[in-house]
Structure formats: structure tokens, C-alpha cells
Image: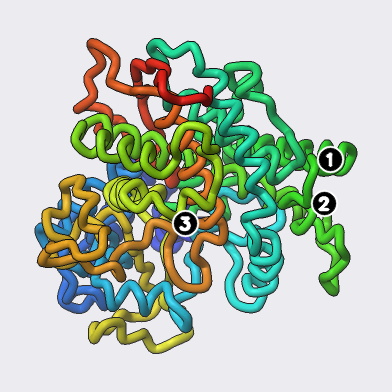
Amino acid sequence: MILLVVQPVSLLIFIGEPVAFTKLLGIYFMFLGSLSLSIIVYRLSSFHPLAQYPGPVIGKVTKLWGLWKALQGYKHVYHKELHDMYGPFVRIGPNELSVIDVVAVGQILGHGGLNKGRFYDSGRHSSTPPTILSLNGEAHTAKRRVWNRAMTSVRDYEPLIGKRASQLVSCLRDGGIVDLVHWFDLFSFDVMGDLAFGGAFEMLRDGQDVDGLGERIQTFMKAADLFGQIPWIINTLHLFPQVGRTIQEFNDFGQGLAIQRMKNGAVGTKDLWYYLADEAGLEKQKPTLEDAAADGIIAIVAASDTTALALSSVVWFLLSTPEYYRRVQQELDDVIVDGDDPLDVTKHQQLHFLSACINEALRLHPPVPSKGGSRQIPLNQGGRSIAGRFIPPGTSVWTPPYSLHRNPEYFSYPNQFLPDRWLPGSNFERHDAAAFMPFSIGPANCVGQKFAKCELFMVLSILFKSFDLRFADGFDSKAWGLTLEDHFIVTRGPLHVNMAPRRQSTHG
């Protein structure tokens, strides 16, 4: 950056010309113009290492195009359109590829795959330690060991989830028209507050997000997502005081929750914090307060939003297809008869059609549509062969689940909600479960996916057993899917539903 400023001035001095403003302005224009033109020509030329990969011209020229798409919130949809046009390997940036070949995805994300790129550091303040999201290699393995220990037995957390699911239904017991997105958000924040910080929130009780946590998370993640599109700017974020302040305030909020948890202790069981802070003393080196707090706040960001989206999507898809909604209700009534507890996880194992509906909703609305961040071919290596295609060093590689899940090579009728495809004996011509990765795959997959599935079954079981649901009169249900915006997490519009208590249910 300094060289770009100094060179034109140095040139004027070298040739003995007076440094006049108009002349300096002209030489800056010629210098930067010729430099930009040469970069554009090179990036579009056959000499570029990624010249063999197709993609939009503007994407090959500048990453600012990717920044603009990310800002709009629909990059997942646009990337799918690009894959529909160009195939499984698409060049989406000067040195970036988007890949939805199932073999390639396995090689990229699986064991022995590629390391995470710089995107994962985009939301971290310089004073905050790295989290499990950004670590690679041995450091990631050590951190993952702690998380695996915490999430090994979901049964330990079932009472916690069940308590909040019952509270959610109690809050909705009067029925009427409600915004389920709002209530699912409150539920998921309360659950993750219980899990990560020993009961940090009571949003369901208050009926609102008193601390504005949801808005904080959205602001934080939108900034992280945007800067992750242009990772070269990460080292200069300190030049933007407001950005640095936003990130720091969010991290300070996490540390405040950590201090509160240490003061108050856990809520009835060993929570996630118990393991993150290594209160059992099992690790060689005890994590600092900052380390544990950073991972705790990551848990809230990653798990609360994704769970709320999944719950909202399942309800939306089922109410949009009444025949499937009736089948879910019938299955629930057959498996969980009156007097049974809809929160009994042993019953959930028999809910095969509801499970299929959950999978289908996760396929069409994956919690992280663009897979969050990229992987990278190391600069100090000679490139990698991925699914028979050579990818040169320094290339960032994205594996977007939204595009992969809707690839007609792997799923028949890929854009339709057809839960029967997940049932044994289905007659779909194409159904490749290896192309289904809502929780990612490989050593960096979602450590909390069993916990998330438990939440989904508990909430949906007690909700559908307790109420008859339909879209509220006047609500444009068909447009709801268009409100989903991808900013690493998925923001969504209100989901207005009319709820009437079911007379045959003894719950709620």
C-alpha cells in the first residue's frame, strides 16, 4: 500500500519534474490505471493458474464482486446459478473456486483435506484468542478433544432441552397468531445460554430479547462475513475504529457471560462451560478465561441461529405441504399416544417420517448455506489434485452446501420438498446421501449435531402434539423462503402462524 503511494512521487522526483498537484494527479491516474489494467489482463489471460476453470468475468477480475454479493445476502443463490451454468467447478474470484463435486468435497473437507483459509479469522479481534472455528492441525485437534468430551453424551443435556421446550409451549399455550421465528429464536438462545454459560438468559420468560443479543450477533456476523470475502483487509481492521469496536464489544459480552458463569456455577448438570474451562483438570494446560469465553460465545452464535432456522424451515415446509403435515401429525399420534410424554427421546426414534422431514428441510435450507468459510491450498506446496482436477497453490476453495444439496446429479427433483426420499425403499432415481452435509463433514464437522437433532425432535414433537398450526390469514407464506439471507448465519423474516390447542393432547 505504501509503495503505491510512494512510487508516482518518486518517479517525478527521479525525472526532475516539479511536484505540482495537477501533474501528480495525472501521474497517479496513469500509474494506477495501467497497474489495474495489467492485473485485469493477467487474471483473464490463459497464463493465470485458474484459467482452465469457468466463471463470470467480473468474478475473475475482482473479489469486490464477491463482497457485493455477500452484502446483498443472496450469494448462496447466486453461486447455485453459477454452478447450474458452469458445472461443479466454478471460478468465483481471482484466486477462488466453488466446488460441488461430491468426491472433491470429501477430499477437501475430509481427513487429510485442506486447512481453513483466512476467512475464519475475519471476526476475531487481535486481543481475542483463536477459537475452534479458526484453528488448524494439532491446535484444532486439541481443542476438538475438549468439545468432543463435552458433547459425547447428549443424554446429559436432555433435561435442559426438555425444560426449555416445555417452557416454549407454555408461552404459546393461548394460541392465536404468533411469529414462530421470534419464539424459536428466544428458545434457542435460552438453551444455549443454559448450555454454554450456566443459564445466562431468560428470554422465553421475558418474551423478548432484552439484551439485544440477536441483533448483536447479526451485526457481528454480517461484518465478519463481509471482511471474510476480502481477507487481505483483516490486518487493516484496526484502521476502522467502529469495526474494531463492534468486534471487541461482542467479545467483551462473551467474557461477561463467562465471569457470570464462574460466579454462579452450572444449572443442575455439567454444562459446556465445565468442559471448555476444564473444571475437571483433564488438560495439560488449563485454558484461560479468554479462551473459554471465546469458545462459549461461538457455541451461542453457531448453535442458536442454526437451530432456530431449522425449526422455522421444518414448520414452513410442512405447513406449505398440508399432506405431509397431516402425515407428521398422524405419526406423532400413533407413536406418542395421549398420556405419553412427547419429550421422551425413546419415542423419537420411532418418528421416521418426522426425521425424513427434518433431513429434507436441512437439505433445502442448510444452516450454513455457503459453508461459512473457505479452505486453502498452501502456498508452500505445489498444488493439489482434487477429484482429478489440479488446483494451484494459494487457491481458496469453497464447498457450498446449498448448491451441493440442490445438484441434480445427486438428488432427483432437487428443488422440491420431498421427504419420502429419506425413507427406506424410496424409488427416487438419484439420492446420494454423501452429498448431504448440513453439519459439514470430516474432522471439522459440527460437534453439536446430535445435540441439535435432539432439540429439533423435542420441540417439533411437543409443538405438533400440542397445537394445530396453519399460516395466519393474509400472511404471504410463499415469500417467506425469499426472506432468508446468508451472512454466514441465516437471517430470516417473521413466520406468522395461527395456533390452536389440540384437544386430544394433554400437554401445553
* Left or right, 357 with reference to 295: left
- Tag shown at residue 68: none
Colour mapping used in the image: rainbow
- Tag shown at residue 289: 2
User: What secondary structure is marked by label 3?
Assistant: helix
Observer-nearest residue: 300 or 161?
Answer: 161
For image coordinates 32% across by 54% down, the residue present is 63
User: What secondary structure is marked by label 2?
Assistant: helix
3D distance between C-alphas at marks 1 and 3 = 32 Å
User: What secondary structure is marked by label 1?
Assistant: helix
Q: Is the residue under label 3 in contact with that under label 2 (CB below 8 Å)?
A: no
Give the mark, 2 or 3, whose residue is nearer the N terminus. 3
Q: Position of residue 191 (x, y in %)?
A: 62, 38
- Tag shown at residue 231: 3
Say which of marks 2 and 3 sits in front. 2
For image coordinates 23% across by 39% down, the residue present is 324
Give the mark, 2 or 1, whose residue is nearer the N terminus. 1
Q: Which amino acid does label 3 sit on?
A: Pro
- For disc 1, the marked residue is 259
Asked if one can make out residue 484 in the rendered structure from this viewpoint, the answer is yes
Q: What residue type is labelled 2?
A: Leu
Q: Which amino acid does label 1 sit on?
A: Ile
Say which of marks 1 and 3 sits in front. 1
Quadrant housing residue 484: top left
